[in-house]
Amino acid sequence: GSLACRHRPQSRPLANASQYVLASLSVSLLPPPPLGRNSPLGEGTRHRLGRALRDATGRYSGDEVEVALSGGEYKALVAAGTKLRLVHPDLSTFYSQRALADSASVQLSARDKTNGSGTLHGRSMLVLGSMGGFPTLNELSSQMKNLQARYPKYLHGPQQVGRSRLGRPIEFWCIASDAADCGGRSPKPSALFTALVHAREPQTLMCALRVVEHLLAEGSSGSRAYTHHLLHQRKLLLLPVANPDGYEWNAAHNPHGGGMRRKNGLRTCTSSGSSATDGVDLNRNFGYKWAYDSIGSSASGCSDEYRGTSAFSEPETQAIRSIVRTHGPAAILHWHGWGNDLAFPFSYAFSAALGRDDLYLFQEFAKEMTMRNGYASGRAWEVVGYTTNGEADDWGWGDEHIPSFTLEVGSSRDGFWPSPSRIAPIAEESVWPAMYLLGAAGPQLQIDKVSVSKGVGASGTVQLLFVLQNNGLHDFSHAHSFCVSTSTPGTAILASSAWRSGCWTIAALRSRQTSSLPALAVSLPPSAGQTVEFALNIKALVKTDPLNTAIKLHVHNDEETTRSCDELCLCKQTDSALLSYSHACRKQLKAGSDCRVPLQAKMGANYASGVSDEFFAFKKTTSAQASGGTCKVSTSHRDTLVAVYGACTRVGAQEPLAFSNSEGHLASAEWECAAGRTYYVFWNAQYMPGRHSFTIEESGLNKTIV
């Protein structure tokens, strides 16, 4: 059930240049396939090939990697001398055959788990559709009506917001505890979620459906306080099929799944308009920086990245704009496939200015949203590896000033049409990111920082320091209480003039504002090495907000933790209701995985693993250049992506100074540098895996040092 499975080479000729094929190449291939701007590959294909290559050497460990290519791309690569093996001459057929082979076991397993209901997963009520496991438009309509019948108080709609190029209705749904909130702007903070902007990415629809199902089921039952709070205090707008013409084309031409039309229903490439390559790429048709260049979008109607004749020329993008301007969502989430990453603005250029506070917001949200699924995050050129213009996130932030994110779901093995057995697991990875963003659309209080230090009093006394933040996009109108208690034997909260019985009142915080609480003295048990548990309780001091948040904090009672810890000692958790503070957490961080724990780079030759993204710290120390000069990082072979930053914060690297992604040349990035300052070199393993060398040079005062 994976794209890395082996098939006998096919000798059947390609039907036409626009037909998609599945091709295989060796990971250790020398020379590498051309991935730069002079490559015959489209931008999206370069990204997919790069992701597949990294998956092969990192997560999946294989000697070959398979990638989707158009027939034209395949022929051009062969003509350029790239050694390829044609795995399957028709990618759509490959997807449908894979789904057929996988679906029987999935349906049997589902019946066993759900007493014959035919649903997909024990935790999820997602229903398998007839199109390779994915629903047709009619099946989706039935599923939504069934969901509405089950939750009539909360699921409202559908509302038509326009018609597609071929006249199909473009509809969205509203999830709110009061139907009156769904008519337009309302007092409740709202978020907009979209799926199937690209028609050949049906997993995006299943992710959106799983999120809605989760919100309705948990929120209405009250089984989880946070989800119940979201259902009653937020409004969710869902556009499940942003591109109905493209999706229906895929259903008509490939009824068992695997259709490869990405764009909408406009005739742009062939005389009949019935090719998979016809249409406008809706994610290049938004207004902000539309047609900024012909690198991040294309003026060719046959290109996968065709941007259309003008910004918002397509009724589908007009519909999204209409929803946004009518309802005023505070946050937007778009699903796309595939990549296992979370991208945010700006995408149109590396040099695009993003204020420090704005970048901090995006990076902080991204870290929280990917806490459980482990996806990479960053601006498009950081995680995807290339620029795009006329893109939805850029428009959401650039024109509407709404934080907007794109969640790329599924791996290279899943491809555009994951196997039926993969639908539910992939969808589950989207639940937490979506719930977090929906919560952050309004006011949202969370623990921002925790630190533990040795007290100044009696032996065995420590001080707990907490910083709380309204991480949401709306202000609080009321105060909160924050209480700390413990049941660990031998541990006691000491009396304090600042804290009353272990509680502190936090005044109403504005959006993104933090509150540093006074130190809380605690006596720990004498036995070192013991884990001490604290119960943290956050409660709104107003009846209209009944949310009561309970969090467990585990602190390891050892000398190293209480004397030499910092913010990196707070472990990354998959459970937001559990925090763990230990020096062991810091030791577990892989060197290079974060700019705060970088590998060290020096003048001359350096090496990156090529398997995972890595940060290197480089300090210019040459005394001869104290007055300033130019630094350069360059690669000696193969394609890659490098960036240089001037600052590192707890949410990520900031102040981008230079960027290069081997587009038509070896990667080489220069920046003005000063002696004594530390710079952070980011090596993105996006394009070609393997141990890579890069060189750092310093030049100034008519002198070059390597």
Image (cartoon, rainbow, N blue to C red):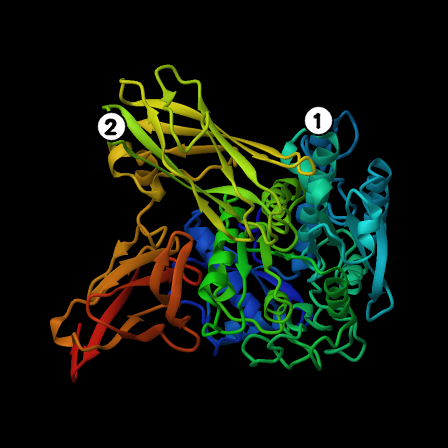
Q: Which residue is mark 2?
A: 457
Amino acid residing under circle 1: Lys
What residue did someone put label 1 on? 113
Residue 71 locus on image (x, y percent): 62, 70
Residue at image position (83%, 56%) is: 183
Report the quarter where the C terminus lies.
bottom left
Q: Residue at x 63, y 44 (%)?
A: 435
Q: Quadrant of residue 17?
A: bottom right
Q: Give, as a three-letter code, the residue at label 2.
A: Gly
The image quarter containing residue 427 is top right
Direction from residue 59 to residue 90 in the image, left or right = right
Q: Residue 564: horizontal and vertical position, in percent? A: 25, 38
Mark 1 nearby-residue class (10 Å; few <14, some 14–19, many ≥20): some
- Which of marks 1 and 2 precedes in the sequence? 1
Q: Nearer the viewer, residue 336 or 187?
A: 187
In the figure, is residue 427 to the left or right of 598? right
Q: Extreme left residue here?
A: 624
Q: Residues within 10 Å of mark 2 (few under 14, many from 20)?
A: few
Q: Position of residue 50 (x, y in %)?
A: 47, 61
Secondary structure at numbered mark 1: helix
Q: Is residue 79 above or below residue 68?
A: below
Asked if labels 1 and 2 touch by Cβ distance under 8 angstroms, the answer is: no
